[in-house]
Amino acid sequence: MIGLGSAARLLGIAGADTDERVIDLVLPPGGERQQVPGIALHFWHLSRDDVLEVGGLRITSVRRTLADLALHLPRNRAVSAMDSALNKNLITPDELHQAKALTRGRPYCRKADGWWDLADGRAETPLETWSRGLHRRRAGTR
């Protein structure tokens, strides 16, 4: 199944800026394999709600993609992806909260915990999100 940045590109989510030369695949745990150049293998459990079919390809849902990206990207890129999904109406604010819930108990979830409230969907480009984020950092807020 296609996930992370590869899924974000297929879903039209901007801002993650992951390496387009690498395909992110999510496989069930227990079948771990050696990594292959050009393919990043991730071994996670997925529920039926975590999966979409787009153009005949099985990819992670918008919620799951954002949850996974938040745990793997720096703050500005993760929040840019969240903003993009909200701005393009790919996800609702309630679904964004559900995406945050998908990170609970996973590695790095505390790192990303405060980022979810920074996304509001007003930014039309990643640069707008980054500008807002940098302003908040200088002001002493998250």
Image (cartoon, helix red, strand yellow):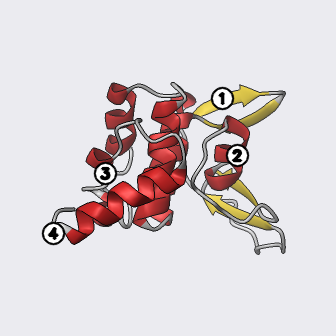
Q: Mark 2 points at which residue?
A: 9
Q: Are marks 2 and 3 in contact (CB under 8 Å)?
A: no
The quadrant in which residue 119 appears is top left
Can residue 50 be seen here? The reply is yes
- Which callout, 2 or 1, points at the residue further toward the start of the chain? 2
Number of the label disc, if any, that sits on residue 140: 4
Q: Quadrant of the N terminus?
A: top right
Q: Name the residue under label 3.
A: 104
- Which callout, 2 or 3, points at the residue further toward the start of the chain? 2
Q: Where is residue 36 in the image (x, y as percent from the top left)?
A: 83, 72
Mark 2 or mark 3, whichever is nearer to me: 2
Residues at marks 4 and 3, CA–CA distance in whole angstroms: 26 Å
Q: Where is residue 66 in the image (x, y as percent from the top left)?
A: 49, 46
- Which callout, 4 or 3, points at the residue further toward the start of the chain? 3
- Which callout, 1 or 4, points at the residue further toward the start of the chain? 1
Q: Which amino acid does label 1 sit on?
A: Leu
Considering the numbered disc 4 on the image, is that residue within a helix, a strand or a loop?
Answer: loop
Q: What residue type is labelled 4?
A: Gly
Q: Is residue 87 left or right of residue 29?
A: left
Q: Name the residue under label 1.
A: 52
Mark 4 or mark 3, whichever is nearer to me: 4
Image height check: is 106 above or below 98? below
Considering the numbered disc 3 on the image, is that residue within a helix, a strand or a loop?
Answer: loop
Q: Is residue 33 left or right of residue 116?
A: right
- Which callout, 1 or 3, points at the residue further toward the start of the chain? 1
Image height check: is 49 above or below 79? above
